[in-house]
Image (tube, rainbow, N blue to C red):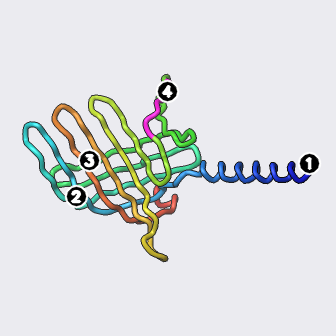
Amino acid sequence: MKKLFIALSLVASTLQIRSALAEELTNFTGHWKGSGQMIQRSPWTGNKTEACSSIEIKIVQVTDRFTMQHYDATCGLLSPDWGPMNLEIHGTKLVERFEDEDPIEVGSIEGNILRTTFHESATYAFNLRLNPPAASGKDPTLDSYYGVQNAMGTIVIEGRLDPVSSTLSNLE
């Protein structure tokens, strides 16, 4: 009986450790910069793809908060520049909270992927994928996706970004 109790205790401890490890989220904190492309689809002007000479993102993520401090892209004549965007982290869910309203689930962090979708006068999507270093001694990379869809069409900006700095002191 004592051996059975010890065995069950070990199994329970192992499950608790696995559960705690599974709940640890990927941290996207950093100052990221790179290039990419913009894809436009419009029922009036057709489809076109343009290079983005620069995409820059600054993120601070702590245990219960994800803050997109700044997003800036230079893609031909289009230069989206926005931020901050403050989200709360509840488990793997991302929620946006306004002063007098209930929180709204807008996304999730699952593994190394962050996904968000916002619906206002247009639909906005902002997604990230943190890629592990390609080799020992190399830095991770960040794939970014920012899309806007409305009656005029769809614009998507995609890029692969490298870390400029991953220290919080450089992000303030």
Disc 4 vs disc 2: Cβ atoms closer than 8 Å? no
Which quarter of the picture shows residue 33?
bottom left
The residue mark sitting in front, 1 or 2, is: 1
The residue mark sitting in front, 1 or 4, is: 1
Q: Which residues are magenta?
A: 102-107
- Distance between the Cα atoms at labels 2 and 3? 11 Å
Determine which residue is flagged by label 1: 1
Q: Secondary structure at mark 2?
A: strand
Of the residues under marks 4 and 2, which one precedes in the sequence?
2
In the rendered structure, find residue 99 and report the number of the disc placed on it.
Answer: 4
Report if residue 172 is visible in the image: no
In the rendered structure, find residue 85 and report the number of the disc placed on it.
Answer: none
Residue 12 point in image, percent of width and height: 76, 48
Q: Secondary structure at mark 1?
A: loop
Residue at 35 percent across and 54 percent down: it is 144
Of the residues under marks 2 and 3, which one precedes in the sequence?
2
Q: Amino acid at mark 1?
A: Met
Of the residues under marks 3 and 4, which one precedes in the sequence?
3
Q: Secondary structure at mark 3?
A: loop
How crowded pointer 3 is (Cα within 10 Å; few <14, some 14-19, many 20+) is rated as few
How crowded pointer 2 is (Cα within 10 Å; few <14, some 14-19, many 20+) is rated as many
Report if residue 92 is visible in the image: yes
Of the residues under marks 3 and 1, which one precedes in the sequence?
1
- Distance between the Cα atoms at labels 4 and 2? 36 Å
The residue mark sitting in front, 2 or 3, is: 2
Of the residues under marks 1 and 4, which one precedes in the sequence?
1
- Distance between the Cα atoms at labels 3 and 1? 66 Å
Determine which residue is flagged by label 2: 52
Q: Amino acid at mark 4?
A: Glu
View extreme (top): residue: 100
In the rendered structure, find residue 80 and report the number of the disc placed on it.
Answer: 3
Of the residues under marks 1 and 2, which one precedes in the sequence?
1
